[in-house]
Each structure stands twice: as C-alpha cells, then as structure tokens.
Amino acid sequence: MIMYRVLLYYKYVRIENPEEFTARHLDLCEDLGLRGRILIAEEGINGTCSGTIESTEEYIQHMKSDIRFADMEYKTDEVPDHVFKRMHVRCKKELVTFRLPEDIDPNKISGKHLLPAQWLEKMLEGDVIILDGRTDYEFDLGHFRNAMRPQVRSFREFPDWVKNDFIRFKDKTILTYCTGGVRCEKLSGYLIKEGFTDVYQLHGGIINYSRDPEVKGRLFEGKCYVFDERISVPVNFADKYTITGKCHHCGIPTDRYVNCANLDCHLQHFECAACEEKWARSCSEECMQALRHEILQNT
C-alpha cells in the first residue's frame, strides 16, 4: 500500500523578510515530518519534498491558506517511502542561480505557456527549436525527441552559452522545457530579453507532461532526472521506452546513473551492471586505485 507522496512545486511571488519566512517554514515542515529541499527567496519559493499522504496534504492546505500561494500548482508522485534523507529549507538570493546583472522577473517577462496537448502539437509542427532548459547530464538521461542539448553543467552557464552559440536561432520559434517549470520561467524570459521573439515554455515541465492523461509523455525519450534518491522517473507511457544513456566504460545503452565510489571524485556517470562489477563503480582506473574508495577501501 502506497503511503508516501512526493511534491514538486514553485511560485514566483514577493516574499517579505525571506529569512524569517524560511525559519518558520522549516519548523512547519519538521512538525509535519516532511523531508526534502525547499528554497526561499524574495522572489518566491521552489520546493520538492516527501512525506505521508496525510502530511503532504496538510502541507498543501497550509500553503493554500496563504493568499500568496493559494493558486500554487503541485506535481505529485506516489512512492513507497521517503525519497530524501532529511529536511532542508534554505534562504537564497535566487530560486534558480542565474546571476544576471539585471534579474529576470517571470511575472513581467516570460515565454508563453503551453499545456501538454498544445506542447505536443507545437513539437509536431516541425519548424521549431526545442531547447532543453536543464543541464547536459540531465539531458543525457532523457529528453524530448529532436531537442537541443545545452552545453552547460549548471544553470548559470546558460547566458554565456546563449550569447555565444544559441543566439543563431533568434528568429526561430523556440520551445523551452525543464523538470517542473521553474527554470524555464527565467530562461524563456532571458531569451526574450536577448531578442528572441517567438518563445514558449512547457507549463509544469516534464513531470506535468508525463502525468497528462491525453499525451502520456509522448515523444519523450529516456527518463527524467530528479534530485532525490530515485535519481530518475519514467515519463513516456505512450511510446516504446528508449534508453538514451551510454555506459561510461563499454558504451552499451544504459539508464543506470551512479556516483564514482572514490569519495574524492563522486562523479555521476552512466555505468551498466557488468561494468559496475568490473570497475567497482569507479569512473576511471585512477579512481579505482584511490585511497578513499568506498567499496575497495584501498590501503
């Protein structure tokens, strides 16, 4: 019997005294027995957490009682247990780290939202550029068919990449997407600010798209990377499953993401079951010989 649920949500809304709000929010989450990661800033809230069905519902109702978050949308997944080890609620300067000289306010400038069915229809038009608004390692685990792989390892690298590379598509129709929507609110707004004129974003991101009863995740290949103990979740329930990742060592298709067992490396990489046994979950020969190897415990 499923007793737990994962919540994924965000809202760009003005929060006065975010430090004080953060402290009170942590108390709330701990009282409810939630675990997860919630970021709070003057510009809003961005969170993902897990808890029992009852505690997550109580959390949602508490947030709805605050007019600032009354219309906040939640993506939910039912799971057998917690998917986080502990609860973190942190006050940040930005909900997603962009570090622009002049910040983007999604409530004033952002790409046009497309619901899942509209997104699918737009993708099928053909003459569009589908831009993954996540990082390269998230893309490698799974992405929409024909999407462009961003050459970035963190979200704050997007502005330079856009100016130095992606700017050549300025006159094209751009479709942006990310996990839950929070990053594309900013990214699509930034594209518009840089002169892109026809910019859209997937409302609710990949997670919302995968749960839509009409599209059922169609045209998404691979799995969606998530920042919890599950590492990935399935998306496409309409088409045959396609593995997009390749083993770091032997190159065969695999969707197994692991962390290098060298505690001084911890590189996340694709590794098939056979190579994990052969390489002891190491990403390289050097790491396999490392003194702080959590499996081999070299001395």
Image: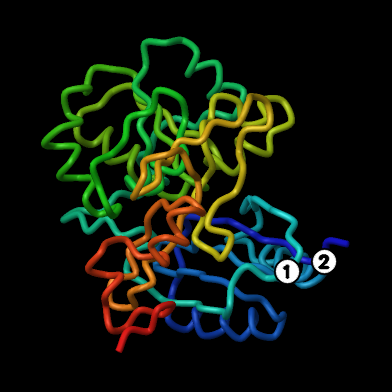
Q: Position of residue 111 (x, y in %)?
A: 39, 33
Residue 102 position, x and y percent, is 20, 53
Residue 63 is situated, as x and y percent measured from the top left of the image, at 66, 66
Amino acid type at mark 1: Asp
**Position of 273 relative to 163 (above/below):** below
The quarter in which the C terminus is drawn is bottom left
Mark 2 secondary-structure assignment:
loop
173 on left or right of 209: left
Furthest residue in direction right, as rendered: 1
Q: Earlier in the sequence, mark 2 or mark 1?
A: 2
Q: Would residue 31 appear left or right of 260 to someone viewing this image?
A: right
What residue is shown with label 2? 3
Q: Looking at the image, which residue sits at the far front?
A: 278
Query: At 43% from the left edge and 76% from the top edge, which residue is drawn?
Result: 18
> Residue visible at 18% across and 41% down?
161
Query: Mark 2 touching mark 1, by CB under 8 A?
Result: yes
Element at badge 1?
A: loop
165, 47: nearer the viewer: 165
In the figure, 227 relative to 255: above or below? below
Frontmost residue, 4 versus 257: 257
| Image quarter hosting the N terminus | bottom right
Measuring 47% from the left and 84% from the top, which residue is drawn there?
20
Residue 297 in the image: above or below residue 260: below
Give the total number of marks visible in the rendering.
2
Q: Residue furthest left?
A: 164
Disc 2 residue type (three-letter): Met
Q: Which residue is mark 1?
A: 81
